[in-house]
Image (cartoon, grey):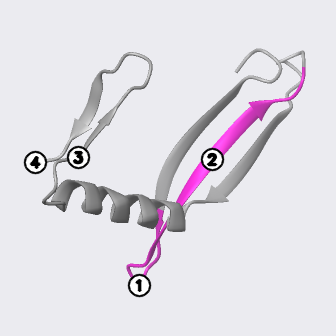
Amino acid sequence: MRRPGEQASAEFPLFHRDGHCRHFKAVARNLLHDPAVGGIILNLHDITELKAREASFRLLFEANPVPMWVFDCDSLRFLAVNDA
């Protein structure tokens, strides 16, 4: 991240001792024009509920007895097709 405004992100799980898991997304962004000076800001977002909803919709898609598909609107290329 050498240019001002440039950012990078990563998602990771955080496991508690009791086995409970939370999911986080870290977003780092360069704030300054001179990378030698520093100036990175890091934001952490709890995305646990988002991951749970995503898993629920994925299960609905994959286990549905009705044929379903997801395609790219621009290229009309298939991105995913369920087993039905």
First along the sequence among labels 1 and 4: 1
* 76 with respect to 74 (left or right): left
Residue 14 position in % (x across, y down) = 49, 64
As drawn, the label of residue 18 is: 1
The residues bearing labels 4 and 3 have C-alpha atoms spaced at a distance of 8 Å
The magenta-colored residue range is 14-32
As drawn, the label of residue 69 is: none
As drawn, the label of residue 83 is: 4
User: What secondary structure prevails in the magenta region?
Assistant: strand
Q: Look at the picture and state if 28 lies above or below 55.
A: above
- Pointer 2: what residue? 26
Labels 4 and 3 touching (C-beta < 8 A) = no
The answer to whether residue 20 is magenta is yes
* 2 with respect to 66 (left or right): right
Name the amino acid type tagged 2: Ala
The residues bearing labels 2 and 4 have C-alpha atoms spaced at a distance of 34 Å
Disc 3, SS: loop
Q: For mark 2, does the 10 Å Cα neighbourhood hold few (<14), some (14 to 19), or many (20 or more) residues? A: some
Residue 23 position in % (x across, y down) = 50, 61
